[in-house]
Amino acid sequence: MKRIIVADSSLELNEELSQRLGVHFVPFRVDVGEELFIDDGTVDQQHLLNAMKAYPDAPKSAAPAPGAYLEAYGDADEVFVVTLSKKLSASYNNAILAKQMREEQNPQVKIHVFDSKSAVCGETRVAGAIRAFLDAGAVFDSIVKKVEEKIEESFTFFVLESLENLMKNGRISRWKGAIAGALSIRPVMHAPGGEIELYHMARGQQKAYRKLVDAIGETGANLAERVFYISHCNAQEAAEVILAMVEQRYRFRAVHLTGMKVLSSMYAYDGGIVISF
């Protein structure tokens, strides 16, 4: 029996996770002015960030089309799909359309689309749970039930180094962004139910990092049974510092650090950090 994991390219991996999880990706597309970036893992991140900084408006993204998902499902007997929060993207709905198309072609196929209610390493956490159950030989319905439960009890937080993208896409006004920048205000955000909300406003990046670590203890439970993920956009050193703080204060079952590809970099921007547990 062929059982596979499919995900949109918001999901982030490092080399070890890539080999172990075996995810089949369908890429987002990001347009920065006249320049097109396909999120297939081949884009130079610094070139993308430079293009975004030089472009006066907000970049635009396009979710994978249903046809791309259908192709990724292939001839698998069981397909487990992980998408960016459906409140943030059309990726989930397109994966559902592809599921319906594939079921019309083969009524025997089993496909479940998981709304991660998260992004970036929050999706990675979902894929990691699926792989663990697959490796344990769990049956399809059991995997669906248990992973959906894990999604409901997961947490995602992130810190932005720059408010530039939020100003460009109209999430905050330019004058508010300018004031926040002048005062070194750094928002700590979270994603309850898959929607992005403000968790805390910190004065300075180091205080924001400390609040990010504090948030783990403020919200999480049974940490020793959880896996911790952290992803960064061009901020390896900062991510390693945060990870060291996390490991000093908390005991997780395992920890993983990844970089970011195109879509995640577009939203997190230069210096952004995302954690999920």
Image (cartoon, rainbow, N blue to C red):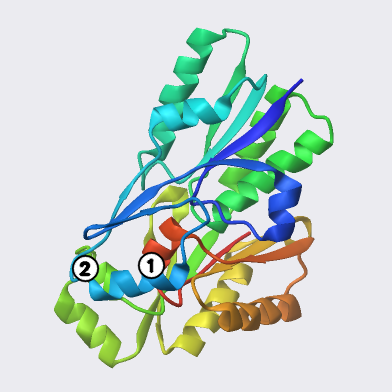
Amino acid under disc 1: Leu
Question: Could you tell me if residue 15 is visible in this image?
Answer: yes
Q: Secondary structure at mark 1?
A: helix
Amino acid under disc 2: Lys
The answer to whether residue 88 is above or below residue 165 is above
User: In the drawing, does residue 162 fall left or right of residue 213?
Assistant: left
- Mark toward the start of the polypeptide (1 vs 2): 1
Closer-to-camera residue (51/22): 51
Q: Hey, which quadrant is residue 258 in on the image?
A: bottom right
Q: Position of residue 129 (x, y in %)?
A: 70, 44
Q: Position of residue 186 (x, y in %)?
A: 38, 81
Q: Which mark is residue 48?
A: 1
User: In the drawing, does residue 81 fall left or right of residue 164?
Assistant: right
Question: Could you tell me if residue 145 is visible in this image?
Answer: no
Residue annotated with mark 2: 168
Q: Secondary structure at mark 2?
A: helix
